[in-house]
Image (tube, coloured by chain):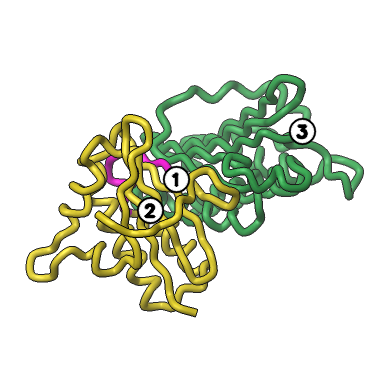
Chain colours: A yellow, B green
């Protein structure tokens, strides 16, 4: 996968949420993402997009994470929300994106995100997703 | 509920809260705007678990107060912007929830602008079934563990 998403890894202002794989991943992640998308001043349609991406990550990521939890770093910028999902098992980043394909619709994350990239870090890899709205 | 006296002196005698795996963990800069993020996560869990409304209101208030203590008192300057400056663990229990709020700064203490302890800790104590406050080495960092259970069980 390609893209030019900058990393929010450990930088000031990063919010990190770690949720044990299970029924709480979706409800917690969508609320946190929705909150931060609003803080980033994304317009309502892009906020909805961000929540939809969060829902897809929540439903697909547990099958591809390197541990027993879904970890997401979130960073807001000027009308920009950046998600870093992982650690994922090797190959998990691309697999997660492929899993986000909805029959008849296509790959939802690819369609909604401005940038997607999978970056290796150590023995794991991370999925970076950036949603923005042009200012 | 209200299993404990809200008097500050009672803090010394409260039982430790047993540790369990944490299903949800948040690490954030210790800034006021992030308290709302914690509240959103708490509300999501409460809704998913169908926790009683009164319990959720107690949790919201106490957790907000604990996080506010970190934001106001734990750090000076840019330390508050570190990603791990405010850490919150939300651990659902068979009935209720264990919430742990941690910082790596000066920890909880008297308000510098009031010259003495405020209402925050007594309020938290009044809203929790069990409360444990511990400090790190050299008084660096603090950990506030709050156990919430429905009122009928804590009575």
Instruction: Report if the CB atoms under discs 2 and 1 are less than 8 Å apart.
Output: yes
Marks 1 and 3, Cα distance to the nearest angstrom?
Answer: 32 Å
The image quadrant where one finds the N terminus of chain B is top right
Instruction: Please provide percent x and percent y for residue B51.
Output: 40, 49
A10 lies above or below A26: above
Image-quadrant location for residue B130? top right
Question: In the structure shown, which secondary structural element does the residue marked by tag 2 occupy?
Answer: helix
Decide which of tag 2 and tag 1 comes sooner along the chain: 1
Q: Which residues are magenta?
A: A17-26
Q: Is residue B97 above or below residue B41?
A: above
Density class for disc 1 (Cα within 10 Å; few <14, some 14-19, many ≥20) is many
Image disc number at residue A17:
1
* Residue B118: % across, % down: 81, 45
Q: Secondary structure at mark 3?
A: helix
Q: Assess disc 3: are there few (<14), some (14-19) or many (≥20) residues with their C-alpha within 10 Å of its C-alpha.
A: few
Residue in view at x 77 percent, y 33 percent: B8
Locate residue A22, reporting x and y percent.
27, 41
Whether residue B64 is in magenta: the answer is no
Is residue A70 at least partly visible in the picture? no
Report in which chain the residue with disc 2 lies: A
Q: Give the CA separation, mark 2 to mark 3.
A: 36 Å
Q: Are discs 1 and 3 both within one chain?
A: no
Are marks 2 and 1 in one subunit?
yes
Q: Residue furthest left?
A: A104
Q: Which residue is mark 2?
A: A29
Q: Which residue is mark 3?
A: B8
Indicate whether B122 appears above or below A79: above
């Amino acid at each position: 996968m390609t893209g030019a998403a900058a990393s929010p890894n450990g930088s000031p202002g990063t919010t990190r949420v770690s949720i044990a794989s299970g029924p709480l991943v979706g409800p917690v992640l969508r609320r946190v993402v929705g909150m931060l998308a609003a803080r980033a001043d994304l317009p309502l349609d892009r906020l909805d997009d961000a929540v939809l991406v969060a829902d897809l990550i929540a439903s697909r990521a547990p099958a591809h994470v390197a541990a027993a939890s879904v970890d997401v770093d979130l960073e807001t910028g000027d009308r920009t929300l950046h998600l870093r999902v992982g650690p994922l098992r090797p190959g998990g980043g691309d697999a997660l994106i492929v899993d986000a394909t909805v029959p008849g619709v296509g790959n939802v994350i690819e369609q909604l995100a401005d940038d997607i990239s999978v970056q290796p870090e150590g023995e794991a890899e991370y999925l970076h997703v950036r949603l923005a709205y042009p200012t | 509920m209200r299993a404990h006296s809200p008097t500050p002196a009672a803090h010394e005698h409260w039982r430790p809260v047993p540790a369990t795996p944490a299903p949800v963990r948040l690490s954030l800069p210790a800034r006021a705007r992030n308290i709302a993020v914690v509240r959103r996560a708490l509300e999501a869990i409460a809704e998913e678990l169908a926790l009683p409304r009164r319990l959720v209101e107690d949790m919201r208030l106490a957790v907000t107060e604990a996080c506010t203590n970190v934001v106001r008192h734990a750090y000076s300057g840019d330390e508050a912007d570190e990603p791990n400056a405010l850490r919150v663990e939300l651990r659902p229990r068979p009935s209720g929830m264990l919430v742990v709020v941690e910082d790596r700064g000066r920890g909880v203490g008297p308000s510098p602008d009031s010259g003495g302890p405020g209402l925050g800790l007594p309020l938290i104590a009044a809203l929790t079934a069990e409360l444990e406050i511990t400090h790190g080495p050299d008084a660096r960092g603090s950990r506030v563990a709050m156990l919430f259970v429905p009122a009928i069980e804590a009575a």
